[in-house]
Amino acid sequence: MDTGLRDSPTGAGFFDAEAQLEKLRTLFRQVKSASLDPAASRDLIHRVAKGL
């Protein structure tokens, strides 16, 4: 069974409803598609550090 965890200022809560899980999966897919691969991430960090 899949379970998600929602953290909030009032505490954490687990959920397992399919609609909520699908929203979480969609969010993770969007974040993954917008993220850099490890090598590009390191290059970005090095360029920013050199600029400081």
Image (cartoon, rainbow, N blue to C red):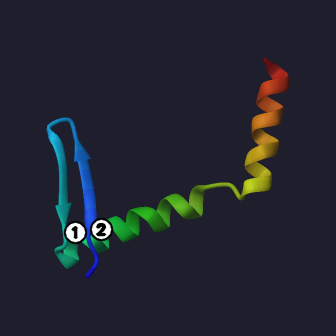
User: Where does residue 49 sit, x and y in percent of width and height?
Assistant: 79, 26
Query: Is 51 in front, or is 2?
Result: 2
User: In the rendered image, which quarter is residue 25 located in?
Assistant: bottom left
Residue lying at 14% horizontally and 37% vertically, measured from the top left: 10
Query: Is 38 in front, or is 36?
Result: 38
**49 up-or-down from 31: above or below:** above
Residue lying at 40% horizontally and 62% vertically, measured from the top left: 27
Dot 2 alpha-carbon crowd within 10 angstroms: few under 14, some 14 to 19, many 20 or more: few
Left or right of 26? Residue 14 is left
Residue lying at 27% horizontally and 58% vertically, measured from the top left: 5
Dot 1 alpha-carbon crowd within 10 angstroms: few under 14, some 14 to 19, many 20 or more: few
User: In the rendered image, which quarter is residue 14 located in?
Assistant: bottom left
Residue lying at 83% horizontally and 33% vertically, measured from the top left: 47
**Residue at disc 2, secondary structure:** helix
Label 1 close to label 2 by CB (< 8 Å): yes
User: Where does residue 35 sit, x and y in percent of width and height?
Assistant: 61, 55
Query: Is 29 in front, or is 3?
Result: 3
User: Where does residue 17 sit, x and y in percent of width and height?
Assistant: 16, 74
The quarter in which the C terminus is drawn is: top right
Left or right of 3? Residue 31 is right
Q: Amino acid at mark 2?
A: Lys
Left or right of 25? Residue 21 is left
Query: Is 42 in front, or is 29?
Result: 42
**37 up-or-down from 47: above or below:** below
The quarter in which the N terminus is drawn is: bottom left
Q: Can you identify the residue that label 1 sits on?
A: 20
**Residue at disc 1, secondary structure:** helix
Q: Can you identify the residue that label 2 sits on?
A: 23
**49 up-or-down from 45: above or below:** above
